[in-house]
Image (cartoon, helix red, strand yellow):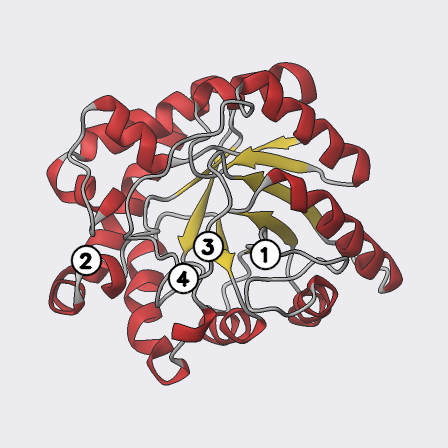
Amino acid sequence: MVILDGGMGRELQRSGAPFRQPEWSALALSEAPEAVVGVHAAFIDAGAQVITSNSYAVVPFHIGEERFAAEGRQLAHIAGQLARHAADSGAHPVRVAGSLPPLFGSYRPDLFQPERVAEVLTPLLQGLAPHVDLWLAETQSSVAEVRAIHSHLPADGRPFWVSFTLQDEDVDDVPRLRSGEPVADAIEAAVSLGVAAVLFNCSQPEVIGAAIDVARSVIERHNAEIAIGAYANAFPPQPKEATANDGLDELREDLDPPGYLAWAKDWRARGASMVGGCCGIGPEHIAELKRNLA
C-alpha cells in the first residue's frame, strides 16, 4: 500500500500561514513558503510516500488572469521546488507528484475552455517539470479535460496519474464523474491514454468504493497494469452550483482518523493500492493510514 499525503489548504491555515480566498493555498507560495515546506514535512513525517506540489490554486480562477500571466510559471516553480526540498529532506524515500488541477474551476466541467488549455497548462508544466517525479491531473470532472491535459504533457517518460472527482449528491446506481459521465467511460479513456494510475479524490468516501469496483473491472478487462487509489474529502457533499471560492466548509465529525481509516480499509479490500486524503484530511489521518495499512 502506497501512502499519499493529505490536504494542503487547511494545514496551511492551521499553521497560521496567510490563507484567504480567492488565492487559497497559492498565497503561501509567495508570502510563507516555509509554511508550505512545513506542511509537506508534516505529511512525510506521518508516513506519506508521495506528496503533491502546492500548485492546485496556481490557475487564473484563483489568482486572477493578470497575476497568472505574470507569475504563473514562477509560482509553479516555487511549488515544485518546495515539495522537492521537503521530499529530499525526509527520513524515507518520497516521490513528488506535480499537481495539475482543473484549469478553469473545480467541480465545474461546464467551465472547461479547450481553446485555452495550452495557455494555462504550459506555465504549470514548465514551472513544475524540474522538480517532480510524476504528473497528477487531479479533481478532474470530465474526460475531455483529462484528454486535453494528456495531449500537452512532455514526452519525458514520467508517469501520468489521473484522479477523478465523483458525483456525491443525487447519486444513482452508476458511479459518475461530476460531468455526469459514467466512471466506466472515464476509466476506458484513462486506459487508452496509458496512465500509470487512476484515482478518485475530492469526493465523499461513500461514493468511492463503487467507483473503485468499476475501475478494477475495466482495468482487468484490458489486462492493464494500472494502479488504483483514493483520497477523499472530510467535508459534506457539495451542491452542483458550488465553486471553490465559496468559502471553507465544516468538517464531518465522523471522519476523524479512525473513521477515515475504516473507509480506506474498504477501498483496499476493493483493490486500491494507494490511499491518502484530500480536503480536511490532515497528518493525523495519514499517520493512522500508515500505522494500519502500509
Q: Is residue 12 above or below residue 210?
A: above
Question: Image point 35% across, 57% down: which residue?
Answer: 243
Distance Cα–Cα, label 1 vs label 3: 10 Å
List x then y, in percent, for residue 93.
51, 28
Q: Amino acid at mark 4?
A: Glu
Residue 199 vertical placement versus 241 (above, below): above
Which amino acid, by three-letter code, is at mark 1?
Gln
Front residue of 255 and 76: 255
Query: Can you give x and y, in whole percent of width and height, for residue 217 in the image?
Result: 84, 56
Marks 4 and 2, how far apart in space? 21 Å
Compared to residue 286, the image places residue 215 above or below, namely below
* Residue bearing the label numbered 2: 63
Q: Quadrant of residue 255?
A: top right
Ranked by sequence position, the earlier of labels 1 and 2 is 2
- Tell me how far mark 4 sits from mark 3, CA to CA: 5 Å
Q: Choose top left, top right, bottom left or bottom right for residue 87.
A: top left
> Could you tell me how far apart the alpha carbons at marks 1 and 2 are, in whole angstroms?
26 Å
Residue kind at label 2, given as amino acid type: Ile
Q: In the rendering, at what x and y percent does residue 146 appear?
A: 53, 69
- Distance from disc 3 to disc 2, alpha carbons, whole Å, reads 23 Å
Label 1 vs label 3, nearer the camera: 3
Q: Is residue 281 left or right of residue 217?
A: left
- Residue 151 appears anywhere in the view: yes
Residue beneath disc 1: 167
Under circle 1, the secondary element is loop
Q: Which residue is mark 4?
A: 241
Q: Earlier in the sequence, mark 1 or mark 3?
A: 1
Q: Are marks 1 and 3 in contact (CB under 8 Å)?
A: no
Classify the position of the C terminus by image quarter. Answer: top right
